[in-house]
Image (cartoon, coloured by chain):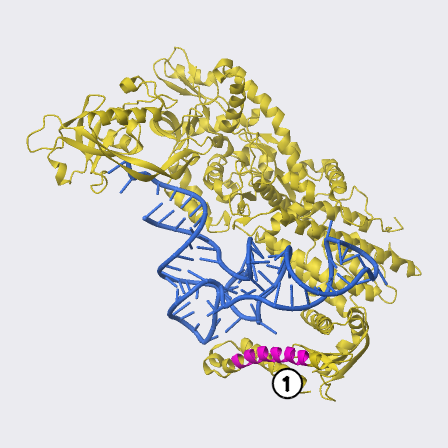
Amino acid sequence: MSELSKTELAKAYTPQDVEKKWYSTWEAGGLFNAYRPDEAPQDPTGRRADDKAPFVVCMPPPNVTGILHMGHALNNTIQDTYIRYHRMLGHEALWMPGTDHAGIATQTKVEKQLRDEGKTRYDLGREQFVEKVWDWKNTHSDFIEQQLRALGCTPDWRRFTFTMDEGYYKAVIEAFVRLHEKGLIYRGKRIINWSPLAQSALSDEEVIHRETQGKLHFFRYPLIDRKADEPEYIIIATTRPETMLGDVAVAVNPNDERYQKLIGRKLMLPLMNREIPIIADDYVDKEFGTGCVKITPAHDPNDFEIGKRHNLPQINVMDTKATINDLGGVYQGLDRYDARKKILVDLEALGLIEKIEDYTNSVGYSERGGEMVEPYLSDQWFVKMQPLAEPALQVVEDGLIKFHPERWVNTYRHWMTNIRDWCISRQLWWGQRIPAWYGENGEIFVGRDENEARIKADAAHYKGKLVQDEDVLDTWFSSWLWPFATFGWPDNTADLQTFYPGHLLSTAPDIIFFWVARMIMGGLEFMKDMPKLDGTPRTKMEDLIPFRDVYFHNIIRDQQGRKMSKSLGNSPDPIDLVGKYGTDAVRFTLLYLAPLGQDVRFGEENCEQGRNFANKLWNATRFVMMKRDEYVSKQSEPKFESPDAETNGSVQFTALKANGASFSTIVPSSLADRWILSRANRTARDVKKAFDDYQINEVTKILYDFIWKDFCDWYVEVVKIQPDSTPLAVEILEGILRMLHPVMPFVTEELWHALTGNDVSVMIGRDDYISADEGKINDSAEANFEFIQRIVESSRLLRANAKIAPSKPVEMIIRVNQDADLTLIETSREIIEKMTRCGSLGIIPEGGPELSNKEYSSDLVGGRAQVFLKLEAVSEEDSKKEKDRLQKELERILKQYEALKSKLSDEKFTSRAPQDIISKEKVKLASFLSQIEKLKVGIEN
RNA sequence: GGGCAAUUGGCGCAGUUGGUUAGCGCGUUUCCUUGACAUGGAAAAGGUCACAGGUUCGAAUCCUGUAUUGCCCACCA
């Protein structure tokens, strides 16, 4: 590659051409693969860092049937950016991909398909139905993977895991059996959340409560054996009349004088004609309603507790479809809503309705199906959570696991300290079947398979038939094992030893309870027995936790602030955006808009910013390459292969790769060079800090500003004027491409190859990330070049004000306050002249003849200099306008000056403020003063 | 009922240990197709940082309260 390059880049960046090519090149080149030290020779890139630690991210597995929405796009972009960043830092970066079987969601979809064919799952039977779900899964799971590829994601596809895979299935069963053996899983008859649609139990987390407009009904329950001075009936209040069919008592507060005498007496439950007692319980609030509560233990969790305290029967009046059953008398067969209507009509006819009021209360709905959840009494399996929650809270409190932003710790703590047992059984067919077998007399045997259950049965001297539990486990009961089951747990695999614990978990905050908290519990509980890589046991908490940092990203909303949702149709398909704007543009935009933990409103047009940025970078590279060709052709003996970076006289290019992780070895020879090198290194430093602090939107902002404003707007312009800066520009650009690569992988890879001429087998993503050389951060160079920039800007402003055509050469004079600046400006003379298009430039010291505002328009550059632009024919009107402008400026500065002056003369300030602040303010005051004087002179002349 | 956030120019947002002449993108106005880029360049207008107190030499930034908005949690029938 002696001819470093020809300028072959197209005029605009077209992502489609570039993305497909590079993705397959990366994949074929093994970029995504992470290897254990013992597998190192397999790494096709030949580069690995045995001495460097792995960096592991487990992808939150999307639902296998789902399509990715904007939230996924953001989340996976965050993860991919961190993976790429750490890969470039030399870590063995492992991103574990996979999908989730999503029990209810998936089963519901397949059942719906069956329904369209006029069938139910029972028509097929369990085995055939599950087979059908597998078919469905197999035809849909590719889709997720393709979308992730389109987003440029680089997980280790070889490790792709599905939560129903054979090995994973085993892990789930193992976890169940172990917890059961420890007494942390039990079976119990409880009130659970029942989804009549899914016909299954739900966990508390799968129920969302919404304020719902309803009615509070006041019913009269007649008193039996009423004495003359007693009321005819007791009035109870209820929001759910249909449950009265299962009433077994009415409770009052023991201290309620109104009813004290009636405690122990009986009421006649209307419609059912059942005698029920009046009982006393502290739970009842005297103030609410009538102070009398009907008690329905089978249909309300509170009533259930009260029922237990008072040994009341539990009468379940509904079946699994929330239809009234045979215990509901004449209402049998009615749906719960129809039953309510009929009960109201019937009670009305009996004159037993006191009144009905409007009432708003919180009602639970199924997160999936959206229907009203029924509190339902049934036998279910539960995980005892408190013993698991305690250490899981501890590791977060102790900072072993850090939340970003930190405030989520509060939410986490609250949930963990008020934790309730987790209902894990689901009356579905799609999922891991509960490994419990029942004997004919209700015996329960839990084992990894039927053999094991049989052995336990034998031990218990049970010889009869064994029937396995029909139910499956909650999907989250498999998800919480994700950080280690994916590596082969419960087997003691080399992968598990090498890649556990992981590092980063990135997720939306809405699954903090579902998933994040439980994964922490799972890691602490299940990894205890697994040895570390060196064979020693995991004794420390930090060896058990599944990850160290949890990044809670924002929720993406539409421009009206609504949550993106399928039903609203307000969620753009990320893949459409990728097609329209390019992957890099979408990635950049999402990260740029994603301040940590703050919801963000997203409009598709935002992607234009990312697209424009990619195009800007593209063209800057195109230009730099063009200048390089030009520069090379002018050199008598270009020495590209030279490893040295000597810069005396004939500047030469260093071999780009040899720079390793820092920007450039070229010794800067001009102010602009020192400036850009300083800015570049400062940027590298700040980017690293932002990455490490999980301020990813800050990363993109810093890069955007540096690349666009410093490099493109100024330094590229400098190169046009100072061709000797070309080699440095090339090297800065090369570093820019590396710095930006984790965020915008495609365009940077394409440009990097164009620029360096590297073979496709060499990938920027396997190369070193830029690290800052802080010794090259040069405050005075930055300040001095900024001074030059301000002068140029002043000149442009004056030209615009005076309406002088941009192309017309002008006469300009710069008057400086300090002699040192005479030389400074002199050395930058060419830059100033070319950038301001001035025909003649005078540089003069303080003092000397005044320049009249009849001839010159002027502008102050802080207190440091004043720029004068020679005007052509000046009319009275122009002159007045110029004076007005100066006057306005004078007033503005005067105001600040006065404020600062009184501040500095305030003894309180001078005695209490730190010295450096005071001296800074003094310098500012002097600057104001000099500006004021100059403005006055300008106005008068 | 408890908790957590947010409130900065027309719109969307930065501003992380209190000290900047309060920034950015979009939009608006003016000018510019000068050999990287019109997906561009140059310039301009536009904000008493929700409100009221307080702490401090100094507050967009810290504290208290108020208002509005959003989210999470909670078994008051």
Chain letter corresponding to the colour yellow: A
> Taking A719 as reference, is A95 left or right?
left
> Taking A454 as reference, is A100 left or right?
right
Task: Give coordinates of residue A807: x percent, y percent.
Answer: 81, 68
Tell me where the magenta segment starts and ends, as one range. A880-899
Quadrant location of the C terminus of chain A in the rendered image: bottom right
Q: Is residue A881 magenta?
A: yes
Count residues near mark 1 (Cα–Cα under 10 Å), then give few for <14, some for 14-19, many for 20+: some
* Residue located 70% across and 38% down the image: A40
Q: Main secondary structure of the magenta part?
A: helix
Q: Toward the viewer: A10 or A938?
A: A938
Task: Give coordinates of residue A76: x percent, y percent.
Answer: 60, 41
Work out which residue is located at the far top of the displayed protein and give it.
A464
Task: Give coordinates of residue A501: x percent, y percent.
Answer: 55, 41
Q: Is residue A254 above or below residue A337?
A: below
Q: Is residue A685 above or below residue A821?
A: above
Chain letter corresponding to the colour blue: B
Identify the amino acid type marked 1. Answer: Lys
- Decide if residue A531 is in sight here: yes
Please identify the quarter of the rendering in which residue A258 is found.
top left
Please identify the quarter of the rendering in which residue A715 is found.
bottom right
Q: Which residue is mark 1?
A: A936
